[in-house]
Image: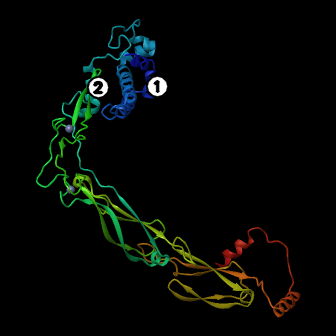
Amino acid sequence: MSATANVTKLDFYEVLSVSRDASDAELKTAYRKLAMQYHPDRNPNNPAAEEQFKSCSEAYQVLSDPERRAAYDRYGHAAFSGGGPAAGGPFGGGGFSGNPQDLGDIFGDLFGEMFSGGGGGGRKTSRVQRGRDVRYDLTLEFEEAVFGKEREITVRRLDVCGECKGTGAAKGKAPITCTQCGGRGQQRFQQGFFSVARTCAVCQGTGTLIVDPCQVCRGETRVAKEHTISVKVPAGVEQDTRIRYGGEGEAGKFAGPAGDLYVVLKVKPHAFFERDGDDLHCVLPISFPQASLGTEIDIQTLDGAESIKVPEGTQSGREFKLRGKGVPHLNERGKGDLIVEVRVETPSKMTKQQRDLIRQLGETMTVNNAPHARGLFEKVKEIFS
Ligand SMILES: [Zn+2]
Ligand SMILES: [Zn+2]
C-alpha cells in the first residue's frame, strides 16, 4: 500500500482540479471526468492510470461527504490518518482501504452498468467496424475545373470478401463461442479492492472465435479491389474542392458500413489566366503607341474571342473588366468576370530610326518628374475599373 499512501498526500482539491469552494455539482462533474478517463476498464495494464483513478476516487469520496469534507478542510489528511479526530473512519491508516460497498454505490450512481462491480456481465465488443474513408486526389486541367468534366477514376480499396460475405469464416463454418471467456467478451480480475473487467484477449471482446477462416480473405473479411468510378466534376470547382461519395470508401470489417470516398480536386495552373475566386485575371502587354493613341485588341478568353477597347492615353496597369467572362459560380447561376490588366511595354531593342523618332517625340513633350502623391496610382486604377 506504500504507493497509495504517497498518493493520499496530494491535496484532494488539486487531485480533482477544483477550487476549495467547489459545489457538489462541480465536484461530481470533475470526478466523473477524471474517473472516466482513468477507469481501469479503459486503461488495461496501466498502473499509472490506476493510481490516478484511485486517488481521484478517494478525493471524491471524502469531498462529496459534507462531514468528511469539513474535517478535511480543517485538518487535511491528518483527519483520516492515525491521530486525527476522525481516526478509525473508513480512511484510517491512510491507505485506501475503504469498503467496496461504498464505492459500488458511487460507481453505480455515476456509471450505471459501466462499473464492473455493480452490474454483472460486461458489454461485448462488436467485431463490426465502419470502413475507413478513402481519399483520391484528382488533377484537373484548368479548363476542366472551369467548365466541369466527367472523369473516370480507378480507386483501389478494401471490399467485402465475396467468398465469406464478410463473416471471415470458411464456407459452412460458423464462428464458435470463445473458449477463453465463454462468450462474455470480458474477463474479470481482482485488483485490490475492486474487480476489473478486461477485454478478452483471445476473442478481442467479441465472444466468438473463427477457427476455420475464409481461404480468400484469411478471416480479414475484406479484400483489396480496384473500382472504376465516374466522377462528375461540376463547373466552377476550385483547388482542393472535395466531392464526397457516400459509401464508396473502404468496406467495414465484418460487413460493417462502408466509409466514404472523398475525391479531392487539384487544378493545374493556366498559362495566362489566374483565378481569384470566380474571377479570372490576365496581363496583356501593349505598346506605347497603342497606349497613347488607343486601339482595339482581340483576346482569347476561355470561351471565345473578345475585343477590348483601349482608349487613348491608357496608363500601364489599367484594368478592363469583361463581365461574365470568368468562371461559372459553383452550383449557382452566373459567372465571375475576366479582368484584363494592360501593361505598357517600353521598347528595349530599337532601330536607329525608332530611336530618332522617340527622341523627336521626347523633345516635344513637357516632362514632370515630380513623384506621385502616395496612393495616387491606386486611385487612378479605381476610377477606371
Ligand atoms: Zn472471406
Ligand atoms: Zn473471449
Q: Residues within 10 Å of mark 2 (few under 14, many from 20)?
A: some
Amino acid identity at mark 1: Glu
Q: Which residue is mark 1?
A: 14
Question: On the picture, is 196 further left or further right than 241?
Answer: left
Which residue is more in the foreground, 316 or 354?
A: 354
Q: Which residue is mark 2?
A: 106
Q: Compared to 74, does 320 lie above or below?
A: below
Q: Compared to 65, does 139 lie above or below?
A: below
Q: Residues within 10 Å of mark 1 (few under 14, many from 20)?
A: few
- Residue appearing at x 32%, y 70% in the figure: 229
Which residue is more in the foreground, 113 or 226?
A: 226
In the image as oriented, which residue stretches furthest toward the top? Answer: 83
Amino acid identity at mark 2: Ile
Q: Compared to 136, does 127 lie above or below?
A: above
Question: On the picture, is 184 further left or further right than 296?
Answer: left
- Label 1: which secondary element: helix
**Toward which corner of the image does residue 286 lie, by quadrant?**
bottom right
